[in-house]
Amino acid sequence: MTGEASPWSAPELLANPSVRVRFWQSASGTMSHLVRNADGDELLFVHKGEGQLYCDFGHLSFTAGDYIMIPRGTMWRVESTTPLAVLNSLCGTFHCCAAAASMRSRPPVPTSRMFW
């Protein structure tokens, strides 16, 4: 199995302004450093492998079939003795410069058309 030790190196499969999905495969199964995502919450679904997650909240054992929710801003890393295959979903709000600029250039919506 080929792959990267960092989930950030995994190819992006799907993306929109709210969610980014990557499929992370790691032959080594161990991350050499901590990572933190300030843009959104991470949701990991472990397809293959087992190991240990170390984060700001402590230590968690995981195995294939487990979901792991990592809140925004949490420092974490994974250690595993087996190869890992993980679906990594980042949930947040992402705006590219063009989208943000087009949103700023729109006139405000009249209050009579807003839904509460």
Image (cartoon, rainbow, N blue to C red):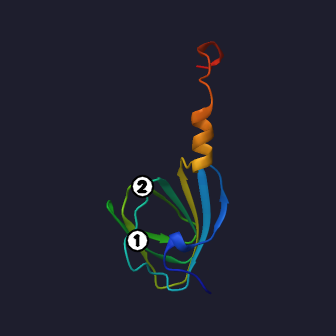
Residue nearest the observer in this picture, 22 or 63: 22
Asked whether, in this view, residue 19 is left or right of residue 39, the answer is: right
| Residue matched to label 2 | 38
Residue 18 in view in this figure: no
Residue nearest the observer in this picture, 58 or 23: 23
**On the rendered image, what quadrant is the C terminus found in?**
top right
The image quadrant that residue 56 belongs to is bottom left
At label 1, which amino acid type do we have?
Arg
Task: Give coordinates of residue 5: x percent, y percent.
Answer: 49, 79
Question: Please, is residue 56 above or below residue 86 in the view?
Answer: above
Upstream in the sequence, badge 2 or badge 1?
2
| Residue matched to label 1 | 77
Task: Give coordinates of residue 39: x percent, y percent.
Answer: 47, 53
At label 2, which amino acid type do we have?
Ala
Foreground label between 2 and 1: 2
Q: How many numbered marks, from 0 up?
A: 2
The secondary structure type at the circle numbered 1 is: strand
**Residue at 43% over, 78% down:** 31
Q: Residues within 10 Å of mark 1 (few under 14, many from 20)?
A: many
Task: Give coordinates of residue 93: x percent, y percent.
Answer: 54, 47
**Residue at 62% over, 61% down:** 21
Residue 31 in view in this figure: yes
The secondary structure type at the circle numbered 2 is: loop
Question: Please, is residue 33 above or below residue 44 in the view?
Answer: below
